[in-house]
Amino acid sequence: MAQKLGVPNIGLNARTIQDLDLDKLKKKTYDGAALEPAYDAPVGPKPSFADASKQSYQGSCHCGKVTFALQSEPLNDLEVTDCNCNICARNGYLWIYPSKDAVQLQGEESLRHHSRYYKSDDKVAGHGFCSTCGVFVLNKLGEPNADSGILPINVRAINGVDLDGLKIKKHDGKTLTGKPYVLIE
Ligand SMILES: [Zn+2]
């Protein structure tokens, strides 16, 4: 039976539709944050950084098994990267790139990693998400095979950030990866 228009009974994440130009979609803001009961963001390590000239932030996955403290320039002063490659676009990450020593991580054992080839013998890490709630928090950038010295953080996992106040820099990862995206067998 046909569904009545305007009364969806399933929510589909448009980001998962291939070759859709996300910038061209009409977007409607929905104030889900105002819904009751209010969400209390989990709080992890109390920031204890040496450089007092920088700002401290706290963040977490949704359920709180993975939490972190971060020291950074004010987030509103940074450029935040919005990449259109096939994994970043699907998950809607917004990346910043602090050095590893500017991040205090708790609950790392609860992280699982999206590695590019999904093989069980693939030792390369990658985008780290909470194994309980599925929220992507960080990017291990090829560890342990390589050490970049930085620990990219998904700004969406930082508590209390006004996403509308961020300077967003578009990164054309889709073109730069050079190859068309194909599903991995
Ligand atoms: Zn979680």
Image (spheres, grey):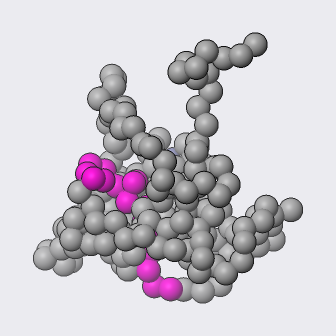
**Rendered location of residue 119, percent (x, y):** 80, 66
Residue at 29 percent of width and 29 percent of height? 34
Whether residue 137 appears in magenta in the rendering, the answer is no
> Residue 91 location, x and y as percent?
55, 54
Q: Residue 108 versus residue 146: which sits nearer the camera?
A: 146
- Image quadrant where residue 64 sits: top left
Using the image as rendered, state which of residue 14 and residue 155 is in the foreground. Answer: 14
Start and end of the magenta stretch? 148-164
Q: Is residue 165 above or below residue 39?
A: below
Q: Quadrant of residue 12?
A: top right
How many marks do you count on the picture?
0
| Residue 90 percent location from the top left of the image | 58, 55
Asked whether, in this view, residue 159 is left or right of residue 20, the answer is left
What percent of the width, then of the height, locates residue 16? Answer: 64, 49
Q: Quadrant of the N terminus?
A: top right
Name the residue rendered at 65%, 49% in the picture: 17
Q: Is residue 168 left or right of residue 93?
A: left
Q: Which residue extends farthest right?
A: 185
